[in-house]
Image: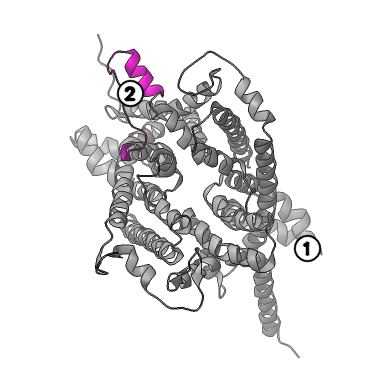
Amino acid sequence: MASAEQVAKEAERRDVRTRWLLSTPALVIILLAATGPLFVMLAYSFMLKGDYGDVQFGTFSLDGWTSVLFQRDIFDDTLGMADAHLSILWRSISLSSYTTVLTLLFGFPTAYFIATRPPKTREVWVFLVTIPFWTNLLIRTFAMQQVIRNEGLVNTALMALGIIKQPLQIMNTDTAILLGMVYVYLPLMVLPIYASMEKLDFRLVEAGYDLYAGRWQVLRRIIIPLVKPGLIAGSILVFIPSLGAYVIPRVLGGGKNMMLGNLIELQFGAGRNWPLGAAISITLMALVMIALLFYVRNASRSQGVHG
Amino acid sequence: MAKRPFDIQAQPGFGFVALVTFFALYLPMAALVAYSFNAADSLSRWDGFSLRWFISAWHNSAVQDASVRSLVLAISAAALSTIVATMAALATTRTPPYPGLTFKYAFINQPLMVPEIVTGVALLIVFSRIKVWTGYSGLGYLIAAHTAFCIPFAYLPIRARLESMDLTLERAAADLYATPWKAFRFVTLPLLRPAIIAGLMLAFVISLDDVVITEFVKSGGQDTLPTYMLGQLRRETSPEINAIATVFLALSVVLVTVFYFVNRRKP
């Protein structure tokens, strides 16, 4: 006869089985249409490229990977650095870093401003940040184009005021991409900083002033350390999508000022070099993972400090 | 004049930067809307107020097709992802740890971790081959891809609600001889409804907005509204695109507002 313990164990096993059954559809869909293809792409990065895109199946080659950084000279067949790829890699990393810094400079005071409003109006301000956040990214990019194009808002205003005679050429430059990214990703910085600022105990700030700290000292020694998790979360949330940006550089950078995302698209389109495209994609993913690891390490450390 | 009392929370200049930020957030969108009412044939000059571009977009059959396709896709992906995400959320909450639980969390949230362009080309690689093998090039690929990246967005609010839910009501139902299914149907599901609606709306908006993955997965002639707009931007942009963008923008604002109020009403 089954003991009570055996019955309980059997029930638990059935429970685990039900839970696996319930989660299977979601896992299968993600496996087929998200995770699985990433592994296929990894395999593709180690094959020879086909003549019209695709790959030659079953071949093994490191060409895709070496051409991420090097290119074979068409005259003497020697390997040199692929300057175009390196400059695109550098543009991606530096524009994403600038974007992160600029969104921090604007996002931190904005989050602070919202957090210090009375609770009722606070909700309204948060809502005002949420609307652009949920507006289609392409439309927001396109909206930025209306401001910076030659006949756009900025140039029309500056010319009407007589400050400039010729329209400023902002479109199709790195500056245009930077402006677009700061505009599009700003809410991603404000919201997490606000989330940690909301929990800030302003009695600590008061204590700081009582101990003769100035505003700057209070900001630097009390407020910033306490909202650090939010600052890091916001920076990561801005840096990662910036690094993989595709639509913004395509619309505002005008084809020549590419970032990694556009370089990947080029290899799968006109470049017809799928192994190279796959290798660059994995490089981009690796950069993202490094940023995430940095975040996880920092997050666990600051959790340790503040209990 | 009396000195203003010392405001402990104020930091000099922060309010100004915040107002600049809010101004900057809304100025481009305002410009977009304003230019969409331009009567001129090109965006380079202002010829007065007119609705002509809205009318011409309304009658443009490519825009009609793309809008219908966007809606069909977003409704299918939102419905499918919310159903499977609800099941997955039930399977991963309110349970003692069991083998595979952490793996499931990581796996379900995986689409959030990878840049869209990378997912897009990976799907291009796999789906283009399947298209050749099977000869099928319908909307199924787009529905599968959209469902996959919508699952985490539907999963997160539903899981959060389940975790904060009280178990006693379900136990009471079980004590009153309700079968597990009946307890779910009459107790858990009604309590979960606000979160399911929130998840459904999030998934809908996410699918409707997607441009990158759609661009790589779609077959010829399968434009959605965002990919149609992206394609048009390659050429000289016509004010018609502004009109389409304005309507799309208005739709997003309505959806976000509804979402905000649905979410706030939770008990």
Which stretch is magenta?
A: A152-175
Mark 2 chain? A
Asked which quadrant contains residue B127, the reply is bottom right
Indicate the secondary structure of the residue bearing disc 2: loop
Amino acid residing under circle 1: Trp
The single residue placed furthest to the top in the displayed view is B1
The single residue placed furthest to the bottom in the displayed view is A1
**Residue closest to the eye, B10 or B110:** B110
Whole-percent x and y of residue A123? Answer: 50, 32
Asked which quadrant contains residue A4, the reply is bottom right
The crowding category of the residue bearing disc 1, from other C-alpha atoms within 10 Å (few below 14, some 14 to 19, many at least 20), is few
The crowding category of the residue bearing disc 2, from other C-alpha atoms within 10 Å (few below 14, some 14 to 19, many at least 20), is some
Q: CA distance from mark 1 to mark 2?
A: 68 Å
**Residue closest to the eye, A270 or A260:** A270
Which residue is disc 2 drawn over? Answer: A167
Which residue is disc 1 drawn over? Answer: B181
Q: Residue at x 80, y 62 (%)?
A: B178
Q: Quadrant of the C terminus of chain A?
A: bottom left
Q: Nearer the viewer, mark 1 or mark 2?
A: 2
Q: Give yes or no for residue A163 being in the magenta stretch.
A: yes
Whole-percent x and y of residue A257? Answer: 35, 44
Mark 1 chain? B
The answer to whether B150 is drawn above or below residue A3 in the figure is above
Q: Give yes or no for residue B132 being in the magenta stretch.
A: no
Indicate the secondary structure of the residue bearing disc 1: helix
The single residue placed furthest to the front in the displayed view is A75
Q: Residue at x 60, y 47 (%)?
A: B207
